[in-house]
Every structure is written in C-alpha cells, then in structure tokens.
Image (cartoon, rainbow, N blue to C red):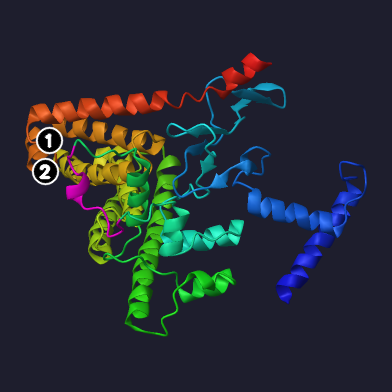
Amino acid sequence: MEGDFNHVNEVQSLLAMAKEENITNSDGSPLNSRDINRLLLALRYNGFESGIYLHFSMFNHDEDPNCIKFRPSLEEGNETKVNNSDDNARKLPHYSEARTTRYVRKGEALTLHYLENPREVSHATRRKILWDQHRFDIGVENAYRKFLHLPDDVTFNGISDDDVGGTKDYDYDDQTNRRRAIYASELVNGEFPDSSLEEHKAMGTINNTTNSNNGNSKDQDEEEDVTVTSNIEKSLDDLEEMLQELQHIFQNTKGALNQALPYSGAFERAAALELTFGELVTASRSSLGNDHHILLSRCRRMHLDSIELVLSKCSDFLTEKQSVELMARFLPTVQMLLESQKRRLGSHHTHVAATYHDFSMGIQSLLSLSSRRLLSLKLEGMGSLEECSMMELYCRREKERIERLYPRDVEEILEMVK
C-alpha cells in the first residue's frame, strides 16, 4: 500500500511540474495521469542506463546477441566550450553506437544483451533483473534452452576442454557451439541451477516455468547451487567496491609518491585485495565445478584489474621478484578468461580484443622480466621461448584485427550525410 501511495504522489508531482513548465502531448493536449504512467513504463522497460532512445529501444534482448552498444566516448576533437571560455573547454560525449559482433544474415533481427555492466552475472540474478526491469522471463533449464534456440539434439552436459582446447576444427563462431557454451557456462557441478524461491516471489507470475518437486533432494541440490552462485556474487560485489575505492584513492594521489604513509597503506590494501581475488578464483572453481562458469569470467576479469592496479600504481613499492610473481599470476588468469570469452562471445567480439591485448602485454612483460619464470608456467601453446613470442604476436594481431571491425566512426558518417 505504501508503494502505491508513493507512486500516486510521484505521478501527481510530475503532473504539477508538466503544468508549470507547459509540457504537453504532441497534439497540444495537457498530460494526464495515464500519459505519465505510460512514460514511466516506457522509461523503465525500454530505457538504457544513459536514457531512452527511439532506435535503441527497438533492439530486443538475446543471450547470444549479434550487436554490442558503445556508449558515447570522449574522443580527441570532441570538445564543447563551457561558458564560452577556452579555459573551461572540456570534452563531452555525443553519440552511442550499436555495432554488429559477427556476420548477420539478411532478415535476421538485430539484438543486444541488455545487461552489459556487468554482463557476467549468474542465471538466477540475470533472470530476476530482466524480469524486474524489462518484464520478460528467460526461464530455467528447458525454457532457457528454447530461449537460446538450441536444437533439440544438442547435448547439455557441458563442454569439456577436450571438445575445444587446442583443436583446430572447433569453430568458436558456430552459432550452435556458441549457444551451447552459453548454456554450459551456467552449470554448477554439471547441473543447471533453478532460480531461488525469493526470486520467484519477486517475479510474481513466472513460477509456471520452474519445476515443482515438493521438497525432494533435487530441490535441495538446486537451492544449494543458487546459494553457491549468490555467495560468489556477494563476494564479488564487496571486493569490487573495495577495488573501486582503491582506484579512487590512487587517482586522487597522483604525484604523491613521496607521501609514503598513506600511499604505502593503499599499496598494502591493493596487494592484499589481489591475493583475495586469486583465492576467490580458486575457491569458486572448486565450488562451481565448472572452469568456464559465467561467474568465473567476472572473477578473473577483476583479478586482472587488481593486478594491473598494483603494477601501474604501486611500482615504486614492488621488488622485481614481486613484479615477476604478479605477472606469473596474471598470465594463467588471462588465458582462461580468453578461452571462456571466445566460447561464449565468438572470436570477433570487442571484449575478446581487450583480453587479447592483456594477454599480449602480459607475455611481453614476463619475457622481459624473467623468461625462465614464463616457461615454468607451462601455459598451453607456450612450451618454448619461440612459441611464447609467436603467441604474443598472434594475440597482438588478433587484437588489432578485431579493433578494425569496430571503427567508431559515427561522427564521420554523420558529417557525410549532412
């Protein structure tokens, strides 16, 4: 009742503001409560984080989308003067872009993944967010397989490394392979977890897509699976908050390396956080029983971010041996992240390009710091220094190849059509 009362007050407040500001419908008629409610629903179920857009709102969600949305970026030359003062000139974003991430057949719908930040959340969490914000259900188990448009004859017991690892015949860009990998990335110890009871209550009318097993052992196992993923997500949320706080501290202490006491304290926190992320990756692999679970991609990505933070902001506090060991933890993490991303996203995705870049830079760094330590990692396809150099070159070229697929030239296109 309190929520209904607050909503009525909100609508009345907006109606009063519309009247005061002379905001009307396109035909000049005054706004009424129905108009306001329609606008609120449109914003809630069709809006993006940065606003609502006529063309972007036409994109449907897909767990395996063929497009990616780029937010406005601060490019060189994209400057807007503030208060007509050159001294206050600053760069402002202009346009968002949607780019295809693979070849699209004629007549195929263009789709986006509605969750991009972060995209790597558990099925249960993603299901609840999509229902709460967009009012559609991706379902569980059989319903989810149909949502992915997987053929009936495709097996769903996961994809082993023997299926993919190192085999030249495996096609990362085959739609069935990719969607099978997306499904497999949700499995916990070989089983697809059900959504939790709390989420079913929150989603109201979607209980018909779940299995009712009257409290049997399978129900208990599914609840345990959801608990595993929710615990990992809670840990990730807490650690990410700590990481962002440290990034803010380092950003605001540029050039303050001589202030040893506060900076060294932040260094110790950053070093401890990196180790905690590494431990979370190890513990999550064990509890999930799935090396390529969707949450492990987020774990690994944030582990890489924490290592980069220590290396880039705390180099004055690191010995050469510490730098070597950080890179020795960086490379296995980035290699596993790259494999997981290629399985789920294909080989042309911009996220894959970023990870190729990280892999290339990591190999370069450890080659220069300690080639012996690099070889001791025994990474796949990197059994000799020559193979390590070839892998570095391959990653660099793949990063450049993928980047060329996303020219971000919307400003030039708009200039041409003026």
Spot occupied by residue 384 in the image (x, y as percentages of width and height): 7, 32
- Check the image and name the residue furthest to the right: 29
Side of 221 relative to 39 (left or right): left
Per the image, the residue denoted by label 1 is: 382
Residue at numbered disc 2: 377
Range of magenta residues: 155-167
- 304 vs 347, nearest the viewer: 347
Q: Which residue is pictured at 19% across the width and 33% down the height? A: 363
Q: Is residue 156 magenta?
A: yes
Q: Secondary structure at mark 2?
A: loop
Identified by mark 2, the residue type is Leu
Identify which residue is drawn at 57% across, 24% down. Answer: 410
Q: Amino acid at mark 1?
A: Met
Q: Nearer the viewer, residue 95 or 80?
A: 95
Q: How many residues crowd around disc 1 within 10 Å: few (fewer than 14), some, or many (20 or more)?
A: some
- Is 41 covered by the magenta stretch? no
Q: Is residue 85 above or below residue 49?
A: above
